[in-house]
Amino acid sequence: MKKSKFSLILGLVLVLSLFLSACYGGGGNKTEGQPKEDGGGNTSGTDAKPNVPQELKVLETSEIPGMDSVMGEDQMTFTMLNNTNEGLYRLDKDQKPVPGVAAGPAENNGKDTEFTIKLNPDAKWSNGDPVTANDFVYAWQRSLDPATASPYGPYMMIGKVLNADKVYAKKAKPDELGIKALDDHTLKITFVKPIPYFESLMAFQTFYPQNKKYVESQGKNFATNDKTLVYNGPFKLTDWDGPQDTEWGMTKNDTYWDAKNVKLDKVSFSVSKDPQASVNAYNAGEADLTGKLAQASIISQFEGSPDLQRYLEPSVWWLKMNEKNPIFKNLNIRKAVAMAVDKEALTKNVLANGSVPADYIVPAEWIKSEDGKDFREGGSYLKTNKEEATKLWKQGLKELGKSSVSVTYVGQDTETSKITDSFIKDQLEKTLPGLKVNIESVPFKIRLDRENKQDYDLLMGGWGPDYNDPMTYLDLWVTGGEQNHMDFSDPEYDKMIAAADKDGDAAHRWKTLQDAEKKLLEDDAALAPIYQRALNTLQKPKIKGLVHHDLGGEYSFQWTTIEGE
């Protein structure tokens, strides 16, 4: 594992943690800092590069699980892909899709089911090859090849792209998939239903192109490190030795078609899973931007500081209950678990970071109907009720013929996750007599793997939107769904989702989706929503134009500049 100056100083700041925590007062202004992007991420109003080194030092809370776009399934991977690669469209400073590899807006057949896209002739890979329509065809076909085992390809394409289900089931040839290269710079994409959010969907990393010649030349080594990758985005990955690496970088990609508007020359990344160590490194000048800070004791050090950035994310965290374990086949047991945790105490006293209790799956303050109503006006479910939880638990044990139960709870190995998981364990064991919870804290990549393999009883997981529609949360739980991973099945729920999928009446579809959420939680207690996360990070005032996204990759560094020291 590579060592750097950061690694050495991190050890020192860990030793100095208590001293620095006590001394830092967070500035004199008593109002909380807010995101500083000025209505579009504009910086100084000039295209000239500021006369200071355009280098950024970033702390992350996890390693990169992988860099193969068809294998991506997590925000960290998507963030790195978003900055080193590009699809037909990308989200801009105002969260609107704008042309990336596409030369402009798509030609629509008028029904939102067929789109023809001309490609930017200046789009190139970092090895000099042009980005062609066939690069998209190849990547999409590869993501639906069962041998690839893409976790997101089938989920994102089946039920949307023509013949995706048949290609994945090997009942149709790959060239029958609803994506065709009419020539090197023209794509035609066909869907099985209207996709009015086509351009934002195409900005998602699963739909990125791949250079077939290059991928096949690398074979099994493709995307295992920065030397076995090729890029078509604003930056190139450097010094990345693979998923175990805790330090890597990005440098400007001079072959990118819009390179003249990319001002950063270098971004350095280091993984720090201890929030206090991250804060101390930030104070010591070893970082310009931290990862998410979720602990009250950490965040309180910066209340009143303009460096503290906070806002409510459209990401919801929940406990998944694996029904491969017969215990969780019991409805009363699932309801008991879902109502046993004091979410208010968790968010106010443990996290204390702006996160809010979640009695829902589709997040609050995220998506609105055509008449301007928040999806959350549909209701809330599985609120904390310890007395009822205890009653249901005892009834469930009686139905199962058991007096005690021991379960494995899989969580992450960050300090924030450990504190959260410990609180939930305590709440469950105290509220549900006879329950023993054994926590296993593992690195993010291993947590993903265990979720995919259903190697858990309880698992703390979360989800952020892949596109701007409630369906991005609600179709996760259909029978046999690619992201279900807990053996939950309700044919009536499946019918509701299928009906909404084909419904052309926006108001009726909206109500169907709200009813589906109610059934999933109130009737089935399929999983236990815990909280909607608020993002808290520290960001140096010298950073301008850093853009945060709700969909896919978390950040775009493409428009970022460093102004001042």
Image (cartoon, rainbow, N blue to C red):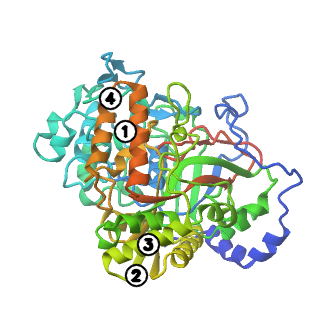
Q: Can you tell which of label 4 and label 1 is closer to the viewer?
A: 4
Q: Give the number of the disc on residue 406.
A: 2
How far from the left and from the top, in percent, is residue 81? 44, 47
What amino acid type is highlighted by mark number 3?
Trp
Please tell me how crowded label 2 is: few (under 14), some (14-19), or many (20+) other residues with Cα within 10 Å.
Answer: few
- Mark pair 1, 3: CA separation: 62 Å
Q: Secondary structure at mark 3?
A: helix
What amino acid type is highlighted by mark number 1?
Gly
Residue bearing the label numbered 3: 393
How far from the left and from the top, in percent, is residue 113? 29, 24
**Which badge, 4 or 2, is on the more N-terminal residue?**
2
Of residues 102 and 26, the one nearer the viewer is: 26
Residue bearing the label numbered 4: 503
x 35%, y 68%: residue: 328
Q: Can you tell which of label 2 and label 1 is closer to the viewer?
A: 2
Please tell me how crowded label 1 is: few (under 14), some (14-19), or many (20+) other residues with Cα within 10 Å.
Answer: few
Of residues 182 and 178, the one nearer the viewer is: 178
What amino acid type is highlighted by mark number 2?
Ser
Q: Give the number of the disc on residue 128.
A: 1
Q: Are marks 3 and 4 in contact (CB under 8 Å)?
A: no
Q: Secondary structure at mark 4?
A: loop
- Mark pair 2, 1: CA separation: 57 Å
Q: Can you tell which of label 1 and label 3 is closer to the viewer?
A: 3
